[in-house]
Amino acid sequence: MSDKPQSGELFGIPYNFQKPSLGRMMSSYWQPDEGMLVEKPFGVGYTLNLANWRSWIVLGVAGALFYQQQQSSEEFDEESDDDPVEVVVDD
């Protein structure tokens, strides 16, 4: 049986299925000399580089949107009543 590569690229998207170590996990999320996206330490695709200031803006916007969604769903739950509604149709 032939050995399949543990890491590489497929259609330009990186993959890595080597057993992750703590050092590799920490160093992959903090790369000061790289851009906003870096290769994932395990799995397929890219992840945010926490050493880049743009990543923190993305996380802040995502958190604000999540908070806004939670607040609006709570308001909707408070406003909705389970009482029946009478509908009058004129012919």
Image (spheres, helix red, strand yellow):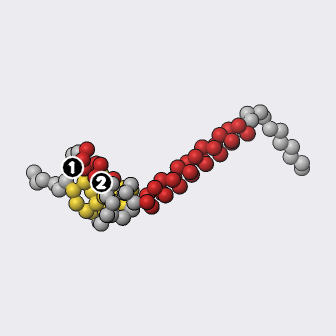
The quarter of the displayed image where residue 8 is located: bottom left
Q: Residue furthest left?
A: 1
Q: Report the residue marked by disc 1.
A: 18
- Name the residue at 43% across, 60% down: 53
Amino acid type at mark 1: Gln
Image location of residue 69, percent across then percent down: 60, 47
- Name the residue at 60% across, 43% down: 70
Between 63 and 44, the residue placed more toward the observer is: 63
Mark 2 vs mark 1, CA separation in Å: 14 Å
Q: Report the residue marked by disc 2.
A: 28
Q: How packed is label 2: few (under 14 Cα within 10 Å), some, or many (20 or more)? A: some
Amino acid type at mark 2: Ser
Front of the two marks 2 and 1 = 2
The quarter of the displayed image where residue 80 is located: top right
Give the structural element (helix, strand or loop) at label 1: loop
Between 33 and 87, the residue placed more toward the observer is: 33
Between 18 and 81, the residue placed more toward the observer is: 18
Q: Residue furthest right?
A: 91
Q: How packed is label 1: few (under 14 Cα within 10 Å), some, or many (20 or more)? A: few
Sequence-earlier tag: 2 or 1: 1
